[in-house]
Amino acid sequence: MAFELKPFTPPDFTTRFFCEAPDCTLVPAPKDTVAPDDYHAMSIYPEYFKIEDSWMLAEESRMDCVPVFKAGRIQVIEPRHLKKGDLVVCGRTEDGSEGVYVYPNGFNEQGAAAETFAFRQGRSRETAYSKDYDDIYELLKYEKDHGYIVWVLGPAFAFDADSRKAFSAIIEGGYAHALLAGNALATHDLEGAYLGTGLGQNIYTQENVPNGHYNHLDTINRVKFHGSVKDFIEKENIDNGILYSCEKKKVPYVLAGSIRDDGPLPEVYANVYEAQDAMRAHVRKATTVICMATTLHTIATGNMTPSFRVTKDGIRQVYFYCVDIAEFTVNKLADRGSLSSHGIVTNVQDFIVNVAKGLKVM
């Protein structure tokens, strides 16, 4: 059965209530990076603002940011990017009565009626995920040509030969349009390609090698000697791995640094806000996001990702998956309240191998 997007049903702004609603309140930002009192903070849902007697959709939304009326449209801006005088929407009533309308049910995904008592209402290790896998296969086949697939990876993938091979096959099969990760994923993936180890352990046998604790540092040092990941791959004749496949297929990747990083690699963003902006450049285009084995990057990406995207064909749903062996991470995403957020509690190395086999890329 071919994958089909759920249709979006917009609000009926011709009703008397919406027609008689006032324009929203616009207040200039008093200083750079400072929002006016009573500013409106965005959610993950489609939001409409009445300006000059017309309801306008904020097309590029992001949770916890502020809507600004600029150049004839609603722009959603991180408060740190506000400029003095920007016209910020103010008001915290979201039912349309003050010109601000938050619309959570455009994809008609009303939750099923909850039983007074029922087992396994959440998502845990005991949940059956067979249907999720089938949905992911069909979704990725559709998104390969019609969407923008963003993967968010923790370093666990780099420690296993099969998961590195599987994700490389997914990239080379065209099922990845951008990769978001940190220094660790990149470092240990390159270490695996260069020295056959991840943190000094053989990535296939998991056996420690002599002086293996130097291997990731030696890898970083060699990459810095060549000046870039791309040049390291070319000069050292690297022929496998996740970053190798990204470079080969010209899939962009963003490596966001943290305070615990070794090195780091030359491509790593040391400034977290620059990293956030670089990540958001891809999240703005994302129609499917799959986060695996990283609480930090998953929550960061989740906070950037709305439940919808405006495309040339209209408003469509954004699909968001969180895959982790830790139920905490999976449930943290559910706490965002996103109707399009799905959690899968499993070993991510097994997960990605299953996905690659389901897509028939390996």
Image (cartoon, helix red, strand yellow):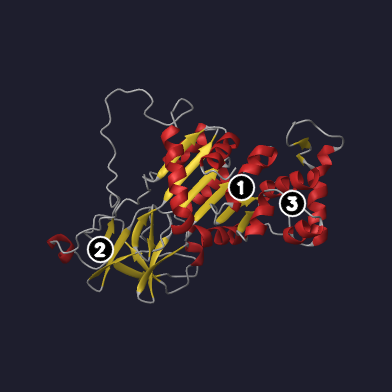
Query: Residue 271 at x, y = what percent?
Result: 64, 59
Is the Cβ of the residue at disc 2 closer than 8 Å to that at disc 1?
A: no
Assess disc 1: are there few (<14), some (14-19) or many (≥20) residues with their C-alpha within 10 Å of its C-alpha.
many
What label sits on residue 169 in the rendered view?
A: 1
Residue tagged 2: 99
**In the image, what residue occupies the spot 25% across and 55% down?**
9
Q: Is residue 337 left or right of residue 141?
A: left
The residue most toward the bottom is 71
Work out whether residue 149 or residue 118 is closer to the camera in this orientation and state it. Answer: 149
**In the image, what residue occupies the spot 38% across and 48% down?**
3
Assess disc 3: are there few (<14), some (14-19) or many (≥20) residues with their C-alpha within 10 Å of its C-alpha.
few
Query: Residue 8 at x, y = what percent?
Result: 29, 55
Identify whether 151 is placed above or below 132.
Answer: below
Query: Could you tell me which secondary element the residue under label 2 belongs to?
Result: loop
Query: Could you tell me which secondary element the residue under label 1 belongs to?
Result: helix
Identify whether 19 is placed above or below 340.
Answer: below
Residue tagged 3: 239
The residue most toward the left is 16
Work out whether residue 84 or residue 278 is closer to the camera in this orientation and state it. Answer: 278
Is the Cβ of the residue at disc 1 closer than 8 Å to that at disc 3?
A: no
Q: Amino acid at mark 3?
A: Asp
Q: Amino acid at mark 2?
A: Gly
Q: Measure the alpha-carbon separation of dots 3 and 2.
A: 57 Å
What label sits on residue 332 in the rendered view?
A: none
| Front tag of 3 and 2 | 3
Earlier-in-chain disc, 1 versus 3? 1
Assess disc 2: are there few (<14), some (14-19) or many (≥20) residues with their C-alpha within 10 Å of its C-alpha.
many
Q: Is residue 195 left or right of residue 328?
A: right
Q: Is residue 185 left or right of residue 238?
A: left
Q: Is residue 237 left or right of residue 351?
A: right
| Snapshot quadrant of residue 68 | bottom left
